[in-house]
Image (cartoon, grey):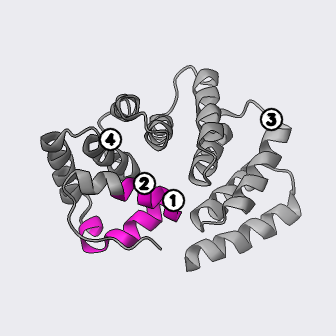
Amino acid sequence: PQALERAVAANRQAMELAPDHPVGLFAMAMTHFNLGQLDASTEQFERILRFNPNDATALAAFSVTSMYSGEVERGFNLVERARRLTPSPPAWIYTALGAGHYLLGEYEDALSALNSFGLVFDVQTELFRVATLGRLGRRSEAEAALSRLRASYPAFERDPQLELKRYLVVPMTIEAVVDGLKLAGFGPEVPIS
C-alpha cells in the first residue's frame, strides 16, 4: 500500500503537468483500482474513454473495475467490446472475460475463457480457474489446479487473505471466489474483510 500511495502522489504530479494525458489517466485509474478506490478508478477510466471511446486497453481494464464494483453486466459488456476492437487481444482479456462469466454464474463459459489465457501462469486467472472448477463440481480437476496454484504461488498458501485482497481487491469478488475455492477443496477459513 505505501508504494501505491506513492504512485498516487507521483500520478497527481504528472497530471498537473499533463492533465489529460491518457497514460497518466490510465496509471491513476489502475492505482486507484489497486487501492480498492473503485469510484476514483471509475472516474479516471470514464475520462480516458471520453477522449478515446475505442481504447481497448482502457475498456478491458475498466471492465474489471466495473465487475468488481458490482456492475458485472456493464463490465462484461465493456470487456466484450474491447475484445471485438482488438484483432489479437492480450491474454489477460480472457481473464477479464472469465471473471465476468464467473461473477454472472456462467461457469462453463468462464472456464472456456480462462482456458484461452494460454500457458503463462497468472495468479488471478488461476484463482478464477480453481473456483470455476469447484463451482462446476469437477473436484479432481479443481484439486489439481489448486495444487498448481499452491506450487506456483506459495504466498497464497502462507496468507490467502492478503493474496486474495491483492488480486481481487473488494470483498464481494473475494467472497464469490472463496465460495468456489472451498468447493474445489481449499481448506483454510478466509475472513472476507
Residues drawn in magenta: 155-178
Q: Label 2's element?
A: helix
Left or right relative to 180: residue 99:
right
Whole-Å distance between the Cαs marked 1 and 2? 6 Å
Q: Report which residue position mark 1 lands on.
A: 172
Whole-Å distance between the Cαs marked 3 and 4? 30 Å
Whole-Å distance between the Cαs marked 3 and 2? 33 Å
Numbered label attached to residue 36: none
Q: Nearer the viewer, mark 1 or mark 4?
A: 1
Quick one: which residue is furthest to the bottom in this view? 2
Q: Nearer the viewer, residue 96 or 119?
A: 96
Looking at the image, is mark 3 or mark 1 earlier in the sequence? 3
The percent coordinates of residue 29 (x first, y second) are 69, 56
The quarter holding residue 32 reads bottom right
Q: Residues within 10 Å of mark 3 (few under 14, many from 20)?
A: few
- The residue type indicated by label 4 comes to Val
Quick one: which residue is furthest to the left in this view? 140
Q: Are marks 3 and 1 in contact (CB under 8 Å)?
A: no
Q: Report which residue position mark 4 lands on.
A: 120
Q: Residues within 10 Å of mark 2 (few under 14, many from 20)?
A: some
Looking at the image, is mark 3 or mark 2 earlier in the sequence? 3
Q: Is residue 161 magenta?
A: yes
Whole-Å distance between the Cαs marked 3 and 1? 30 Å
Whole-Å distance between the Cαs marked 1 and 4? 27 Å
Q: How many marks?
A: 4
Numbered label attached to residue 52: 3
- The residue type indicated by label 2 comes to Ala
Q: Are marks 1 and 2 in contact (CB under 8 Å)?
A: yes
